[in-house]
Structures are given as structure tokens and as C-alpha cells.
Amino acid sequence: MIARKRNLRLETERLTLRLPRHADFRPWAALRHQSRSFLTPWEPAWAEDHLTRKSFTARVYWAQRSVNQGSAVPLFITRRADDALLGAITLDNIRRGPAQSATLGYWIGLPFVRQGYMREAIGAVCHYAFQALDLSRLEAACLPENAASRGVLEKSGFKYEGVAQSYLQIDGRWRNHVLFANLRHDRRGRTDAG
């Protein structure tokens, strides 16, 4: 696992997690377009310019700024065998001081679901967060009916903590979310991360 701000790169058995770059625009736009009906029930509503190069360029600059400022770690998930873009995973809202915590978010393209890629990516990001960033707590939330997301969080060492009412606007509506957390030194049960 290599972790430098400008060239942040996490390696797993099958994956490379790295910052987005301008050359990723076409594969990213194609994967998001192909996966639109699969992703939109679980995500905030897409802006009209969501799949444009201009919007993607802003995303690339935001990613680099966020890493430099220590406020987020937005990574693309690529397959090592062929460098195919599979999805993305982000540690966001990194809080220092007494909190030492962050929020985890992720998506995977439709052709790559149920192949263990997201669990592998979550494991790498949790390890990086606990070891390299010295965070103590990672939080994640998903819609109650998103069984796949709940399952991958639980298999990745996250524990259910409750329900947040009207937590996020998803697909244009305020929606309740179930909350999960993974603690660096979790006394609530075994975890493989960190």
C-alpha cells in the first residue's frame, strides 16, 4: 500500500484505488451512464450536467484539493488486471481533534456488482484510514431497503447504530438512512479492518 498525497494509491489483491484524473472522463461517464438506472435509486439526484466533461473536471480538481487539505480522500476503484474503472469510494468529512472520524461513501458500476470488489475496496480504505490517517471512527449510511449496501458494510466490519430521520435527499426526496460505524478498536465484536 502506497500513500502519498499527490500520488495516493492503495493496492489490494485485485484492485488499485487512486485519485481520479482527467483521462478517466470517458470511462467514468460511460460507466455512470450504463449504470444510471441501477445507481439513481440510491444517490442524490444527478445535476443536469452530471456526465459532462466540465463537471468531471471540477470533480478531479475537488479530489486533489480535498486530499491536500485533509478533508476527504476520494478514490476511483480500478481493476489491476486491466485497469478497468469499477466505481469509486470516498472518505469524506474527515474530522480531526477529539473526533478523529470520517464518513464513508461508495458506488460501483452495474457490470461489477456482487463480485466482492466493494468489500475489498472498503477493507483497503478502512485500513488506510485507521493506520495512515490515524482515524478512530468511520461512519456510513444507506437506505434501509438497500440490502446489498447493508450487507457489504456488515461484512466489512461495520456495526448497525440506528436510523437517522430525513438524513439525505436521495433521488429528490428526503430519506431516512440506517447508520453504521466501524471503530479502530471496536469492542462490540470482531472486525478485520485496521
Image: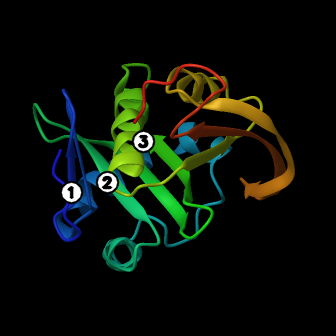
Which numbered disc flags the more N-terminal residue, 2 or 3?
Answer: 3
Q: Which mark is residue 132?
A: 2
Which numbered disc flags the more N-terminal residue, 1 or 2?
Answer: 1
Residue 44 appears left or right of 11: right
State the SS at label 1. loop
Nearest to the observer: residue 99 or residue 177: 99
Name the residue at 62% across, 65% down.
98
Quarter holding the N terminus?
A: top left
Nearest to the observer: residue 174 or residue 181: 181
Name the residue at 62% across, 47% down.
139
Question: Percent from the top left, x then y, of residue 127?
Answer: 36, 40
Q: Which mark is residue 3?
A: 1
The residue type indicated by label 3 comes to Cys
Q: Quadrant of residue 103?
A: bottom right
State the SS at label 3. helix
Q: Quadrant of residue 15?
A: top left
> Which residue in the protein does label 3 denote?
126
**Does 128 sit above or below residue 19?**
above
Residue 11 appears left or right of 86: left
Name the residue at 63% across, 28% down.
187
Q: Characterize the local packing of mark 3: few (<14), some (14-19) or many (20 or more) Cα atoms within 10 angstroms.
A: many
Question: Percent from the top left, x then y, of residue 82?
Answer: 10, 35
